[in-house]
């Protein structure tokens, strides 16, 4: 029975992608277009392009930078979010400034960041963090603001203040919202990882894809794009796994509410 | 509450139909009678001044070509455009086209674009270091960090040749890819030890106190052809007459630009935002009417040795 | 810097927080006069101006590469008098508007469809997770191949990026529908379409509005990015030309315009959100004892 369940789940995951791949395969089979080669050709070069050596030399540094930028974004986002969410004045003052920077496209902002952060790994981590921090920050703000008033008063009447209040009331109450923000930040992080490697990079997954593009190695470029998608998928599965564990109490509560 | 949203959806649908209804105007080389509509994909830089000047002077119109320039920001935008015939012609540096040829991209060079001045004291591209840098000659670049605008391209190939000619070892230079506009700041901040720049970034860097330690175009080959205009092999086969007209118009424009540098500086103001002071200070490239085949052979040779190309480019297939 | 997700997952009790700027139910009684929100916002922007004025004089960055605010503003004033600028602004806004409209429509239609049919949702989940993180910039050669450097290329990139914002939000919204209400509607004999109109749509509307607001921001960023890299007409193209020409003042002036556009779009989006959810706001503040 368990095996059948697992098989069914696996089947659901693979079903649509498999269908799409088949459609892609056949519709591109006779393609002579240089920039849209047949899928057979793309898949054929996948293995020889992404050898263990290249994975270690390019994909690993990218992932490490992504992890570092993401971690910074979570720390800064939650800390700032708690501050901004708790104090209305800070939020009102900062929101237009934050919206202003959010609207500036990364290809324009990265050169400006380069002026301050140099061109090494630091710059790339700053770029990733600067983009990832938004969803986390804003979701933290909303989560903190929506802390249930009854809970809040109860906590206060029990004399719960300061750091303890933060640990036991504010953060747990906001955690589902924060988790949603972290979820979104993950997708953004991957996109920015690629963009940050278009400027002054010397290794990385995004860097490699762009180099393929520049040297007209188009099937290889497509394999890189496929790999990006796979990476995003893998990270989202990992995230969901961790989230289910950490927020088990919340999901159980919602389940109970819904069925009551 | 619901009505504004219904209205929004309807508006969206209308906008979409409107957008789909308007057809793209520059699909093929259409036109009436003897006048052909031609679109050229260019990068809005100093190098393409002759085509703007030629268009202004009517060199294209008198040959029945109604010219439109579409600006892209690099090969990634222009080559697909030419291959898919969105553009009839495009502008690209030689090394990129050589690489494309080795990968069987169906392109063919038609006309010269821009060349080095060949002057070992002043060219439109050179390697710049900070004022107080310990680097004095090209040989000192060995083992240093040098910025170029594209890796595995004319920049790193020519810089290596400069280092070789000056007696240095080019093998452990660390090349970093960065767009020209970001280079002056990177050099000044010490993020890189040196940078290969072209005008106007070169003039801007010199204005900030930078020093040129190598004229890499000059070192690579005499009268180096740096960039060219190209078309798709399909167009070259189907409409050789149009290609010929374009070539004649281009040759006339290039010669004119060479002979009238002041008019070039004026036309630059029309499609770039280069500051007047920089315009007056910068070194203009040379615009010979003919491609220097020997220089391209040299670039192919060097590129093959440096590992830029995986196989030898077939120059007969590529050059006109 | 491309998107924000105020996914209103909710904080457990007082109803799902839709991420709107409704007054917090912890609104303090007006014991003291508080400065109005708008004024504070302007103060924030002024603070940024002051920072940009001071920074170039510090050793942190040279004024050659980051000009002081006064120079940037002077270039901005000059820009406003340039007819070509307004035409470029129009091009950007056109690309933004059309792209957003298409993305929102497609996102809502597909989102409601996929969200209301559990089988569809299960099957498409992996594909959505796969496609979401692929950056629009990777599609640039494809866009140019298909549409050259015109408006359509911009639209391809804008729609691709903004669509996911809307879709994910709508999926969340449809998922959050109260099953009791849904069952009740079904037991009253309401068919699928009627249920979508009267139960699913109102519940998911707050999520949809958040999605539209996020998509609006993303659409702007992608419109300008497309113009920057491909060379389609618009503000991004002008920024690219200013960059390659080394016209630093002009570039920053254009960046300021971009940023202000973003602030403006956000204000409009929030206003639309407030209007569309005016009926919903009153439901907030409900406490389950």
Image (cartoon, coloured by chain):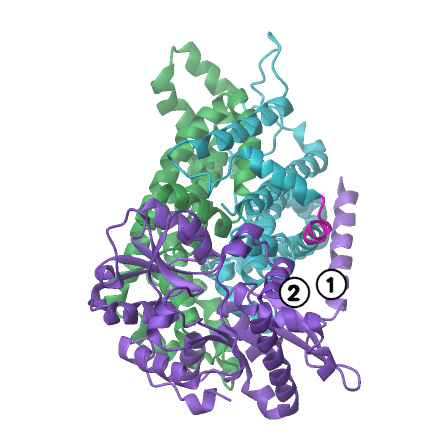
Chain colours: A green, B purple, C cyan
Q: Quadrant of residue C148?
A: bottom right
Say what secondary structure mark 1 lies in. helix
Q: Chain of mark 1?
A: B
B60 horizontally vs A185: left or right: right
From this view, report whether residue C39 is shown above or below residue B296: above
Using the image, name the chain to which the residue with label 2 belongs: C
Please tell me whether residue C83 belongs to the stretch shown in magenta: yes
- Quarter of the image with the N terminus of chain B is top right
Circle 1 packing at 10 Å, graded few (<14), some (14-19), many (20+), is some
Which residue shows up at 57% across the image and 38% down it? C72
In percent of width and height, residue C281 lies at 66, 29
State left or right for residue B155 relative to residue B283: left
Q: Secondary structure at mark 2?
A: helix
As drawn, A122 above or below A24: above
**Foreground pick, C251 / B62:** B62
Quarter holding residue A234: bottom left
Q: Residue at x 61, y 30 (%)?
A: C21
Provide residue C249's location: percent of width, then percent of height.
55, 43
Q: Residue C94's spot in the image, x, y percent?
A: 70, 54
- Over which residues does the magenta segment extend? C81-88
A250 drawn magenta: no
Q: Badge 1 is on which residue?
A: B19
Please indicate whether residue C97 sits to the left or right of residue A142 in the image.
right
User: Is the same chain shared between marks 2 and 1?
Assistant: no
**Residue with the mark numbered 2:** C152
């Amino acid at each position: 029975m368990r095996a059948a369940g697992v098989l069914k789940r696996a089947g659901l995951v693979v079903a649509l992608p498999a269908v799409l791949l088949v459609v892609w395969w056949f519709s591109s089979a006779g393609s002579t277009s240089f920039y849209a080669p047949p899928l057979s050709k793309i898949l054929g070069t996948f293995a020889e392009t992404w050898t263990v050596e290249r994975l270690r030399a390019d994909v690993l540094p990218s992932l490490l930078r992504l992890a570092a930028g993401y971690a910074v974004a979570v720390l800064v986002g939650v800390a700032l979010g708690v501050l901004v969410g708790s104090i209305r004045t800070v939020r009102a003052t900062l929101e237009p400034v934050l919206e202003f920077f959010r609207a500036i496209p990364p290809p324009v902002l990265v050169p400006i960041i380069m002026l301050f952060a140099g061109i090494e790994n630091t710059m790339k981590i700053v770029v990733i963090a600067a983009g990832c921090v938004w969803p986390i920050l804003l979701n933290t703000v909303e989560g903190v603001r929506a802390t249930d008033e009854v809970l809040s008063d109860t906590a206060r009447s029990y004399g719960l203040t300061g750091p303890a209040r933060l640990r036991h009331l504010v953060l747990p109450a906001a955690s589902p919202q924060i988790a949603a923000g972290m979820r979104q930040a993950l997708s953004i992080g991957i996109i920015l990882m690629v963009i940050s490697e278009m400027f002054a990079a010397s290794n990385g997954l995004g860097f490699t894809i762009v180099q393929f593009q520049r040297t007209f190695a188009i099937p290889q470029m497509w394999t890189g794009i496929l790999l990006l998608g796979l990476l995003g998928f893998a990270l989202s599965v990992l995230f969901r796994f961790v989230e289910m564990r950490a927020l088990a109490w919340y999901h159980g509560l919602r389940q109970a509410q819904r069925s009551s | 509450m619901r009505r504004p949203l219904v209205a929004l959806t309807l508006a969206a649908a209308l906008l979409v139909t409107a957008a789909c209804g308007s057809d793209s105007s520059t699909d093929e080389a259409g036109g009436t009678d003897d006048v052909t509509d031609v679109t050229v994909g260019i990068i809005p830089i100093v190098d393409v001044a002759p085509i703007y000047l030629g268009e202004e002077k009517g060199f294209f119109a008198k040959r029945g070509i109604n010219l439109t320039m579409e600006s892209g920001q690099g090969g990634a935008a222009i080559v697909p455009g030419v291959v898919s015939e969105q553009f009839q012609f495009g502008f690209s540096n030689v090394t990129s086209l050589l690489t494309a040829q080795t990968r069987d991209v169906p392109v063919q060079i038609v006309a010269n674009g821009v060349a080095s001045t060949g002057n070992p004291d002043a060219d439109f591209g050179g390697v710049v270091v900070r004022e107080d840098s310990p680097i004095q000659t090209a040989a000192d670049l060995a083992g240093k960090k040098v910025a170029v605008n594209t890796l595995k391209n004319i920049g790193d190939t020519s810089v290596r040749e400069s280092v070789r000619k000056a007696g240095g070892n080019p093998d452990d230079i660390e090349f970093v890819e960065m767009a020209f506009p970001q280079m002056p700041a990177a050099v000044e901040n010490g993020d890189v030890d040196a940078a290969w720049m072209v005008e106007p970034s070169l003039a801007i860097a010199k204005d900030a106190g930078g020093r040129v330690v190598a004229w890499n175009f000059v070192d690579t080959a005499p009268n180096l052809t740096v960039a060219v205009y190209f078309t798709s092999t399909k167009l070259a086969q189907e409409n050789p007459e149009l290609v010929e007209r374009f070539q004649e118009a281009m040759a006339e424009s290039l010669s004119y630009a060479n002979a009238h540098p002041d008019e070039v500086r004026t036309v630059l103001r029309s499609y770039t935002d280069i500051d007047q002071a920089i315009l007056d200070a910068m070194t203009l490239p040379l615009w010979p009417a003919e491609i220097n085949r020997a220089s391209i052979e040299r670039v192919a040779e060097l590129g093959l040795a440096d590992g830029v190309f995986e196989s030898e480019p077939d120059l007969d297939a590529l050059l006109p | 810097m491309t998107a924000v997700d105020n996914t209103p997952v909710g904080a457990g009790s007082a109803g799902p927080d839709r991420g709107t700027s409704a007054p917090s139910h912890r609104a303090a009684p007006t014991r003291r006069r508080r400065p109005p929100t708008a004024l504070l916002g302007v103060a924030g922007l002024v603070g940024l101006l002051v920072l940009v004025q001071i920074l170039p004089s510090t050793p942190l960055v040279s004024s050659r590469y980051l000009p002081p605010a006064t120079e940037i503003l002077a270039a901005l004033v000059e820009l406003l008098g340039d007819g070509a600028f307004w035409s470029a602004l129009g091009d950007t806004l056109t690309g933004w508007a059309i792209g957003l409209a298409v993305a929102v429509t497609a996102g809502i239609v597909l989102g409601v469809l996929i969200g209301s049919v559990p089988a569809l949702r299960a099957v498409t989940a992996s594909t959505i997770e796969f496609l979401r993180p692929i950056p629009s910039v990777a599609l640039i050669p494809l866009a140019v191949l298909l549409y050259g450097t015109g408006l359509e290329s911009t639209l391809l990139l804008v729609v691709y990026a903004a669509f996911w914002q809307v879709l994910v939000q709508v999926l969340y919204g449809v998922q959050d529908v109260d099953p009791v209400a849904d069952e009740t509607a079904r037991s009253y004999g309401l068919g699928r379409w009627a249920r979508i109109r009267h139960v699913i749509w109102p519940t998911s509307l707050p999520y949809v509005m958040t999605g539209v607001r996020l998509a609006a921001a993303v659409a702007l960023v992608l419109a300008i990015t497309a113009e920057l890299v491909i060379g389609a007409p618009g503000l991004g193209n002008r920024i690219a030309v200013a960059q390659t020409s080394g016209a630093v003042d002009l570039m920053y002036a254009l960046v300021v315009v971009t940023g202000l556009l973003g602030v403006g779009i956000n204000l409009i989006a929030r206003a639309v959100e407030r209007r569309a959810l005016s009926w919903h706001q009153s439901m907030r503040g409900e406490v389950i004892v």
